[in-house]
Amino acid sequence: MINELVLLCLVAFAAGFIDAIVGGGGLLQTPATLLILPHYPVATLLGTTKIPSIAGTTLAAFRYSKQVKFNLKVLAACASTAFVAALLGAFLVSRIDNSVIKPIILVVLILVALYTYFNKQFGIHQEKNHSVKKQVLMAAIFGLLIGFYDGLIGPGTGSFLILVFIAVLGFDFIGASGHAKIVNMATNLAAIIYFSSTGHILFQYAIPMAIFNIGGAYFGTKLALLKGNKFVRIFFLLVVFGTILRFAYDLLK
């Protein structure tokens, strides 16, 4: 158990670091946990990873809040619908074959990478071309979609949220990251409520992983706020590219 715990804690630190900057830490943490603890049910491992995820995300959200002015109406709409949808996704996680969803996600990620690479101003400057009412409506809709995905599968949720806040709602990278962390807290909390109520969390692993995830999130957030939007854009591209490779591997193996 000691060797497993050490590996899980190192992975959790790296995941917290990545997640604090551009989201997507679960792309490292979830597959690694499944690999290190193969003898446990998948639902149990998914539930376990939610504890370190929410710990690191909460710290990152707090640090972003010092430099990001939150749009409370948009945030409330997105977080509330995401919370409800994540509960439903967690409930259905053992009832839907993820292989049906992954090819769609892979195509979306490739399009995201291409769009971000060729649009040099993507996420560098904040643009607001929507009315408040339209922003709130779109935030609620995408909150439902991404919240459901997070409860059902999980990895990459932070990156998808950042993408929505930039491409759909007009935020810059730093603002999008800050808002995404709050919404991700809501989806993680919903999943934890479901998984803990059904006995699907291994706290002996989850708590130490949470401590290391917080450490990674601390340094990741500090680096993101120090370097600014251009650095986060490059990091975003790297994580999306890594995500594409991960999904492609899963589909082709």
Image (tube, rainbow, N blue to C red):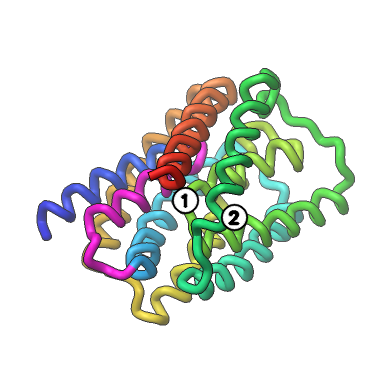
Q: Earlier in the sequence, mark 2 or mark 1?
A: 1
Q: In the figure, is residue 181 to the left or right of 139?
A: left
Residue 87 on image: x %, y % = 56, 72
Whether residue 166 is visible here, answered yes or no, is yes
Residue 250 on image: x %, y % = 42, 46
Residue 109 on image: x %, y % = 58, 38
22 up-or-down from 191: above or below: above
Give, as a three-letter code, the residue at label 1. Pro
Quarter of the view holding residue 142? bottom right
211 up-or-down from 204: above or below: above
Q: Which residues are magenta?
A: 20-41
Please tell me the numbered disc located at residue 98. Answer: none
The C terminus: image quadrant: top left
Of residues 141 and 95, which is closer to you in this image?
95
Determine the residue positioned at 68% across, 26% down. Answer: 122
Determine the residue positioned at 74% across, 59% down. Answer: 140
Q: Where is mark 1, residue-wise?
A: 155
Characterize the magenta stretch by its predominant secondary structure: helix
Please tell me the numbered disc located at residue 183. Answer: 2
Magenta residue check for 21: yes
Magenta residue check for 12: no
Determine the residue positioned at 35% across, 50% down. Answer: 31
* Image depth: mark 2 or mark 1 in front: 1
8 up-or-down from 186: above or below: above
Q: In the figure, is residue 32 to the left or right of 92?
A: left
Q: How far apart, in angstroms, are the residues tagged by discs 2 and 1?
A: 15 Å
